[in-house]
Image (cartoon, rainbow, N blue to C red):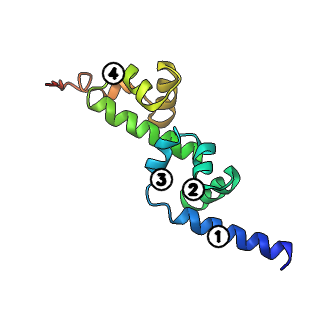
Amino acid sequence: MDLCSFSLRRLHEMKGLLSRIQNWEVLARNAKFKPAIMAAFCCVSLRQLERFFNSHFKMTPTEWARDLRCKIARQLIGQGWSNKAVVFELGYANDSHLCHEFQKVYGTSPRSFAPVYLGTVVFRQ
């Protein structure tokens, strides 16, 4: 077997392995939304993960992870979580990092999704 056919076979095996992953969201959360750690969990290189994401999700793993983390942040804020609690829960560096990433994804601040800001009050027992 020559090197070229070995490389193509290996690439096909990696693609099959990545295609079998059922819950990318759990994997991303366990990897702290870091693509390099996601790749390590999948036993592939970061470059292989990038190619897979490009062909299946039409975006980079970094963009996908940012979107997912902001989606989760939006849900938590909508449930009445404070920005500081969301920062801690999702591993943002600080409050401004959360706001900056949120602005990139939604074009607005996290506060605009807070229940009090929307005119509804969430009471916790």
Does residue 109 appear in this view?
no
Out of 31 and 56, give the one closest to the viewer.
Answer: 31
Instruction: Look at mark 2 in the image and give the residue it sits on.
Output: 58
Q: Is residue 81 above or below residue 68?
A: above
**Count of all numbered marks drawn on residues in the image:** 4
For marks 1 and 3 on the same chain, the one whose residue lies earlier in the sequence: 1
For marks 1 and 2 on the same chain, the one whose residue lies earlier in the sequence: 1
Q: Position of residue 71 (x, y in %)?
A: 40, 40
Out of 35 and 122, give the one closest to the viewer.
Answer: 35
Q: Are marks 1 and 3 in contact (CB under 8 Å)?
A: no
Q: Is residue 20 above or below residue 80?
A: below
Amino acid of disc 2: Lys
Q: Residue at x 62, y 49 (%)?
A: 40
Query: How far apart are labels 1 and 2 at the CA level?
Result: 21 Å
Amino acid of disc 3: Trp
Which quadrant of the structure image shows residue 6? bottom right
Q: Residue at x 67, y 57 (%)?
A: 48
Q: Are marks 4 and 3 in contact (CB under 8 Å)?
A: no
Instruction: Look at mark 3 in the image and give the residue it sits on.
Output: 24
Q: Position of residue 99 (x, y in %)?
A: 47, 24
Q: Give the label on residue 67, or none.
A: none
Element type where label 3 sits in the image: helix
Element type where label 2 sits in the image: loop
Apparent side of residue 2 relative to residue 10 in the rendered image (left or right): right
Query: How far apart are labels 1 and 3 at the CA level?
Result: 18 Å
For marks 4 and 1 on the same chain, the one whose residue lies earlier in the sequence: 1
Q: Are marks 3 and 2 in contact (CB under 8 Å)?
A: no
Q: Report the mark closest to the observer, 4 or 1.
A: 1
Instruction: Look at mark 4 in the image and give the residue it sits on.
Output: 82
Dot 2, how many residues are within 10 Å of its Cα: few (below 14), some (14-19), or many (20+)? few
Instruction: Look at mark 1 in the image and give the residue it sits on.
Output: 13
Query: How far apart are labels 4 and 1 at the CA level?
Result: 44 Å
